[in-house]
């Protein structure tokens, strides 16, 4: 099955696809979702669904010590490395500070029997449309939240803080985001 991480809103980002030959290695750079975020939680999943929680959670860990910066500025590289023994190493590294955390999974944790694989693939096929719709909605919410963030930043830079607070609160309620994003990437 594919291996990846949960991203903002719970979308499953595949770093290693089920069709990739092994041993293999893949990496992706992510960023923070809040201003001054100093910790990100890396949730490692295995499966074929587009929504992370619909897949199997292999484990999670936190990368801390990220230098406080505006949302989107820190660069967090996540590397997946599967060796010849089918063991998975996941490394998250802050490209600015060099801080990193690493977790390892043995082959038995990531190698499922044929029936489980068949079941996971079948489930993904059945839920493809619903997952796609949910993913589209999550991505639209993320885009809307990013636009709100940029508007607030521009208002603050022009000394117009508070000018659109009611409108922004209305927009957040309309898109179902009453709270700021969580500490996931």
Image: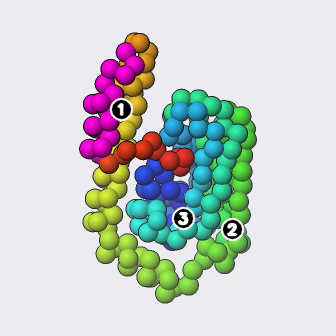
Name the N-terminal-most of marks 3 and 2.
3
Name the N-terminal-most of marks 2 and 1.
2
Tell me the element at label 2: strand
Q: Where is mark 2, residue-wise?
A: 105
Name the N-terminal-most of marks 3 and 1.
3
Tell me the element at label 1: helix
* Residue at 50% in and 47% down: 182
Instruction: Determine which quarter of the picture holds residue 94.
Output: top right
* Viewer-proximal residue among 14 and 85: 14
Residue 174 lies in the magenta stretch: yes
* Residue at 32% in and 48% down: 176
Q: Distance between the residues labelled 2 and 1?
A: 39 Å
* Residue at 32% in and 36% down: 169
Query: Is residue 136 in sight in this rendering?
Result: yes
Which numbered marker is on residue 5?
none
Q: Where is mark 3, residue-wise?
A: 45
Q: Do the residues labelled 3 and 2 touch (CB within 8 Å)?
A: no
Which numbered marker is on residue 148?
1
Q: How is the image coloured?
A: rainbow
Q: Distance between the residues labelled 3 and 1?
A: 30 Å
Label 1 CA crowd tier, 10 Å (few <14, some 14–19, many 20+): some
Tell me: residue 63, above or below residue 130.
above
Start and end of the magenta stretch? 160-175
Would residue 135 be found to the left or right of residue 92 on screen? left
Q: Position of residue 153 (x, y in %)?
A: 43, 23
């Amino acid at each position: 099955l594919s291996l990846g991480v949960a991203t903002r809103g719970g979308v499953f980002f595949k770093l290693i696809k089920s069709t990739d030959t092994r041993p293999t290695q893949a990496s992706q750079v992510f960023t923070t979702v809040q201003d001054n975020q100093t910790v990100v939680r890396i949730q490692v999943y295995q499966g074929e669904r587009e929504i992370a929680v619909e897949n199997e959670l292999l484990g999670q860990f936190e990368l801390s010590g990220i230098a406080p910066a505006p949302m989107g500025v820190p660069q967090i590289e996540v590397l997946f490395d599967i060796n010849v023994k089918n063991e998975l190493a996941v490394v998250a590294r802050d490209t600015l500070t060099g801080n990193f955390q690493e977790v390892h999974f043995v082959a038995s944790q990531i190698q499922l029997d044929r029936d489980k694989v068949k079941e996971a693939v079948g489930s993904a096929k059945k839920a493809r449309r619903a997952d796609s719709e949910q993913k589209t909605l999550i991505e639209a919410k993320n885009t809307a939240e990013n636009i709100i963030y940029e508007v607030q930043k521009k208002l603050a830079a022009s000394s117009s803080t508070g000018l659109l607070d009611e409108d922004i609160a209305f927009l957040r309620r309309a898109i179902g985001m009453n709270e700021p994003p969580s500490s996931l990437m």
